[in-house]
Amino acid sequence: MAILELTLVPIGTQTTSLSKYIAKAYDNVNNKEKIKVELNPMGTVMQGDIDELLKAVRDMQESVFEEGCDRVYSVIKIDDRRDKDASFEQKLNSVNEKLK
């Protein structure tokens, strides 16, 4: 199972506020059964099968285009670990254990 973080930056909007575009993109992926999603202040983190995640990225970009944007800049980080199951909780717990 992979973990992917996506930052979408709509370009060429009439305002500096991007929240309506991000909300639309998040709504597009939040209802997908095979993907766990968490929004954070700088992006959206998703957990699931890598093919499903990459399709979700494309769907999220398209939802921003549908809102009238002509350009979307995307930054994607992927952790696709094959030696054991990775999860949001496992990654955070691993670091938090070392902080104590």
Image: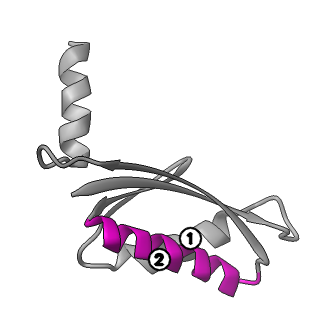
Residue contact at pointers 1 and 2, CB within 8 angstroms: yes
Q: Position of residue 80 (x, y in %)?
A: 29, 51
Residue at 59%, 74% in the rendered image: 61
Q: Residue most toward the front?
A: 82
Instruction: Give how far apart the Cα atoms at labels 1 and 2 are.
Output: 6 Å
Q: Residue at x 23, y 74 (%)?
A: 34
Direction from residue 62 to residue 27 in the image, left or right: left
The span picked out in magenta is 49-68
Give the image location of residue 56, x and y in percent: 43, 74
Query: Which structural element holds mark 2?
Result: helix
Please name the residue shown 33% across and 73% down the image: 52
Find out whether residue 81 is within the magenta segment: no
Residue 27: which disc?
Answer: 2
| Quadrant where the C terminus is found in the figure | top left
Verify whether residue 51 appears in magenta. Answer: yes
Badge 1 crowding class, 10 Å Cα cut-off, few under 14, some 14 to 19, many 20 or more, is some
Q: Residue at x 31, y 65 (%)?
A: 50
Q: Quadrant of residue 39?
A: bottom left
Q: Which residue is mark 1?
A: 23
Please tell me whether residue 75 is drawn above or below residue 12 in the rendered image: above
